Amino acid sequence: MAQRRSPARSGNGRDHYFALVRRLPLRPIRSESELDAAIAMIDALTDRDNLNAGEADYLDVLSDLVERYEEEAHPIGNVSNSQMLAFLIDQKGVQRAEVARSTGIAESTLSEVLRGKRELTQNQIAKVAAYFRVGVRAFMPNPKASRRTGKARESVSG
């Protein structure tokens, strides 16, 4: 009985995967120039509509390598809900009233969040994230940033 192969492991998908690996091998990123090359490849792949399984696998692994490098080389600390909300409002160029209307969150609540007097609830985070088209994780603490901060404190005090 003939054994079926998965699309990522056979035929055209596999050929495309190896062609991408020849162009830009999947190795840890160690410099800004390697990061630039990886981002250019990611951009080229994400600009396409239909990736085959091999290309999608390659993109997934390359994205993980970029994320790992950026976390180490360009760490981003935690930001509060008020800081993230203020940043998103500024970037989109909208008023608080527009965010309130579009999300169904009272403008007074948004004002309190922006002043740091209140935190967004999980439900409100989901609404705000959908409005600004960002992931809800943008409003969640980064545990890796907390660990880095803790390590930095240990080395300073130790």
Image (cartoon, helix red, strand yellow):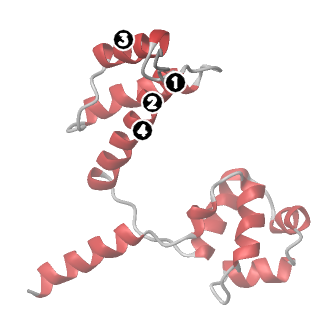
* Residue under the image location 70 percent in, 60 percent down: 129
The amino acid type of the residue labelled 2 equals Asp
**Residue closer to the observer: 74 or 42:** 42
Residue 153 picture location, percent across and down: 21, 82
The amino acid type of the residue labelled 3 equals Ala
Residue 9 picture location, percent across and down: 42, 21
**Residue closer to the observer: 26 or 110:** 26
Assess disc 2: are there few (<14), some (14-19) or many (≥20) residues with their C-alpha within 10 Å of its C-alpha.
some
| Name of the residue lying farthest toward the left | 158
Q: Marks 4 and 3, how far apart in space?
A: 17 Å
| Location of residue 117 by image quarter | bottom right
- Give the residue number, with chain letter if any, for mark 1: 53
Q: Is residue 64 left or right of residue 118?
A: left
Labels 1 and 2 touching (C-beta < 8 A): yes
Q: Secondary structure at mark 1?
A: helix
Residue 25 picture location, percent across and down: 27, 23
- Whichever of callouts 2 and 4 sits on the residue coming sooner in the sequence is 2
Labels 4 and 3 touching (C-beta < 8 A): no
- Whichever of callouts 3 and 1 sits on the residue coming sooner in the sequence is 3
- Give the residue number, with chain letter if any, for mark 4: 63
Q: Which mark is residue 29?
A: none
Q: Which mark is residue 57?
A: 2
